[in-house]
Structure formats: C-alpha cells, structure tokens
Amino acid sequence: MNPDELQTLRFADPRLSRFDPLPRIITLDDFDRGFCGWTQLVGNYEHTLDAMLPGYAQHSAAMLSSASAWEFGSHGGFDGTYSLKLATKPKKGGQNVAIKRLTFRKRGPIRLEFYFTFKPEASELRLGEAEIRSVGFLYDLQSGDADADSLRVMPHMRFLNALDGVHEQKWQFKRRTMALKPLGNEGKTFTHYHLSPNDWEDLPGGHQRLCYNEIPTKINWHYARFDFDLASWQATRFQCNDRVFDLSGYEPIVIPGMRNLWCMLNLAFFVETDTDKRAFMYVDGVCLSGDF
C-alpha cells in the first residue's frame, strides 16, 4: 500500500483522522474501552513501603470519568462517554500521575498525540482559572541492553497554568532532576522524584492562552503533539492547538541507564493543584506512533 492510500484509509477512520500519526500505530487509546494500560505511578521501594518518596506516596489511581457536573449532568469524553481522569488531593502543591509502561523495538522517531482538558473541583460558584498549577506529560525512556550508550532519557513538558495565584499560562521543561537515592541493600532499586517543583525552565516563546470556559464546570478539549527521536535522543516538534513551539533550547533529563529498564518506553500525564482544592486533568484519545 502506498502512502497516499494509507492516508486515505486513515482519514476515513474517525478514530485516526483526528491525529497525524507516523506510519506505525503503537497504541491508540480510547477510554470508552477501559483503562487501556494506564495506571497509577507507584514510587519505588524495597523491603518497606516507608522507603517510597513522599512525592510518589501522594499518588492515587486514575479513574474513568464522564466529567460529571452538578448542574447539567456530564460532559462525556472527547467523544463517547469516558475519559481518563487524574485528580490531586485537596492540598496546595499536590500532584497526581498516570503512567503507561511499554518498551520499544526500534530506536527511531516516535510521536505522542492526545486531547486533554483541566479544571479545579467545582466546589464554588466561581471560575477558578488560577487554581490549577499545572498539567503536563513526559516520556521515560532507556536505551537497549546492547547499546553502547547506556542512558535513561526523560523528556518532560508542563503547562504552568498558575503559581501562587498568578495566572502564568506558559509551557516549561526540565533538564535536571534530583540525585538518585539507593533503596535497600541489594543495589537493584533506586529512586528520584523527577516531578519535584524544582528546576523547571520556561520554553522559549512558550506563553499560550488556552481556552478556559466561563463557568466552573465547562470544559474544552485541547490537542497536543510531541515528537521525539529515540536515535538522537532529541525532541523534534511540540504543538498545542494551533501553536508550534521552538525547541532549539529544549533538553530532556539525561541520567545513566538503570540495570533493569532496557528499551523502556513509558508515557505519563500529571496534574498539580495551586490551592487546597482538588485539580482534575482529563485525557482522551491518546495515539503513540512510530516510524519503523
């Protein structure tokens, strides 16, 4: 099948025509089919759960949600009924993370596309547009066991919506993380909280005003795309809605490879609250594709 025929077939499929995937579809997640492999990010531990870092201990399971609202019922998903919902605890600075754990079979271009939206819990009759601190996503990657360069590479991106009540509305990235902490006495398990509030940097030209509807319960879905090359360990494109951003200053977190994470290809979404109120992130229609 030639590329034009393949493109025609994809445009005819409403599940795929909303995306611009690379030739190989790795995963296509519609949460009307269930969790599709997305689960809670549990922190590392060895011998005792008390070894888990506090940042991870706060995480809870994502849920399937119809985005219900007290005055009009439910928004539903991007299409269909359900989306994946992440909810923080009602404590300023609280985070939650959902993760999907995969491995890759070729080091080459990959593309993550998804639709997302966010709101604080509608516990007051006010908009609350500056009550969510951030929403974001990341890859967690590692080279293969036969690769000469044993690296763990963690491209992070977040939309800093607000900080201490100031409506920031800008994209940020990380190139540094906290030092690795060994767990137990067997030398098999380490931990680091790479989503700590430290070391976030502004993406050049990264200010963006996202649609945030006028009452506490209305949501609008946003499109995001992030391209990464597993061969060069470089980000190649980031887009949100109609904006394509300059990645010339972008760098991922890079640390030495771990002894048991070969060919890792993990995806994660996260949300943070800026007040003592729960923050919600909804994700629907996640497409990961590659060129192989």
Image: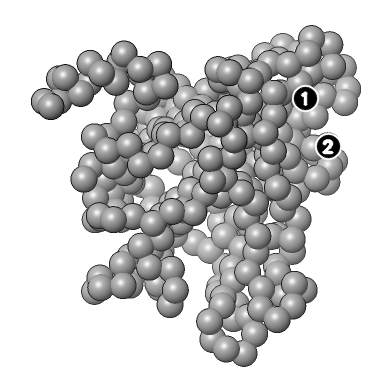
The relative height of residue 149 versus residue 226 in the rendered view (above or below) is below
Q: Quadrant of residue 243?
A: top left
The percent coordinates of residue 271 (x first, y second) are 65, 41
Of callouts 2 and 1, the N-terminal one: 1
| Horizontal relation, residue 281 to residue 170: left or right | right
Identity, as a three-letter code, of the amino acid under mark 2? Lys
- The residue sitting at 53% across, 63% down in the picture is 177
Front residue of 156 and 6: 6
- The residue sitting at 64% across, 85% down in the picture is 184
- The residue sitting at 58% across, 27% down in the picture is 32
Residue picked out by circle 1: 128
Identity, as a three-letter code, of the amino acid under mark 1? Gly
Regarding residue 238, the answer to whether it shows in the image is yes
Residue picked out by circle 2: 277
The relative height of residue 46 versus residue 128 in the rendered view (above or below) is below
Report the residue that reaches farthest toward the front: 33
- The residue sitting at 61% across, 29% down in the picture is 83
The relative height of residue 23 versus residue 187 in the rendered view (above or below) is above
Question: What secondary structure is marked by label 1?
Answer: loop
Q: Quadrant of the N terminus?
A: top left
Regarding residue 283, the answer to whether it shows in the image is no
| Horizontal relation, residue 116 to residue 167: left or right | left
Residue at mark 2 to residue at mark 1: CA–CA distance: 10 Å
Front residue of 175 and 135: 135
Q: Quadrant of residue 67?
A: top right
Q: Quadrant of residue 125?
A: top right
Q: Are marks 2 and 1 in contact (CB under 8 Å)?
A: yes
Q: Quadrant of the C terminus?
A: top left
